[in-house]
Image: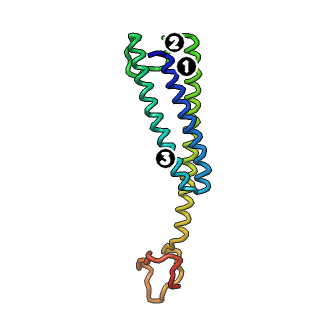
Amino acid sequence: MSVKAITELLESLAMIHHELNKAAGQKVELIKKGDMPALEELVRAEAKLVRKAQATEAMRVKVVRTFLVSKGKITENATLAEIKEWATAEEREQLDALQQRLLTEIHALKRQNELNQQLIEESLRFVNLSLDLMVPHQEDISYKRPNERDDQPYDTGHSLFDSKA
């Protein structure tokens, strides 16, 4: 194995993370529009990208381990610094650039996913508020029959939109 194989895998990981970033950005508009079918399709495509990233990462770990074993160095969790020890100056520059690119993509994806989570939580709060407004509560009822007591439970099976009314 060579450093070139490792750089190709890092390049692939960076591209996959870039695609994940684009998908996360598209989610914002779909969530705002409430377009659930399109959102479901996007989530399925995103899941495929995640599986691809996991497979690429597993291959990278295997290639790095094989590379370091071929150099006589056996480590469980190898770092990029250990690979750079065996790389040429040009390969080191390429590895540094790929490392920075991958870190940038990962941080951007993390920020976008946090924003999407906040947007979804706000949407859920709005839905819950809307539901609360439609279902009457005991303290909201102002009419009582003269023979009813305050300690009787309210029949919660009825909504404000009673068809018999």
Question: Badge 1 is on which residue?
Answer: 95
127 horizontally vs 59: left or right: right
Query: Can you identify the residue that label 3 sits on?
Result: 44
N-term-proximal mark, 3 vs 1 = 3
Question: What's the residue type where badge 1 is placed?
Answer: Leu
Which image quarter is the N terminus in?
top left
- Which residue is painted at 60% across and 46% down in the image? 26
Give the CA separation, mark 1 to mark 2.
9 Å
Q: CA distance from mark 3 to mark 2?
A: 39 Å
Per the image, the residue denoted by label 2 is 87
82 and 139: which is toward the camera: 82
Q: Nearer the viewer, mark 3 or mark 1?
A: 3
Q: Do the numbered discs 3 and 1 sit on residues whose CB atoms are within 8 Å?
A: no
Q: Is disc 3 placed on a helix, strand or loop?
A: helix
Q: Earlier in the sequence, mark 1 or mark 2?
A: 2
Type of colouring: rainbow
Q: Amino acid at mark 2?
A: Ala
Tags 1 and 2 in contact by the CB under 8 Å rule? yes
Q: Is residue 92 left or right of residue 60?
A: right
Residue 33 position in % (x across, y down): 61, 56
**Helix, strand or loop at mark 1:** helix
Q: Secondary structure at mark 2?
A: loop
- Tell me residue 30's x, y (percent): 59, 52
Where 47 falls versus 4 (above or below)?
A: below
- Precedes in sequence: disc 3 or disc 2: 3
- Distance of mark 3 from mark 1, alpha carbons? 32 Å
Tell which tag, 3 or 2, sits nearer the viewer.
3
Comparing 37 with 28, the one in front is: 37
Q: Quadrant of residue 157?
A: bottom left
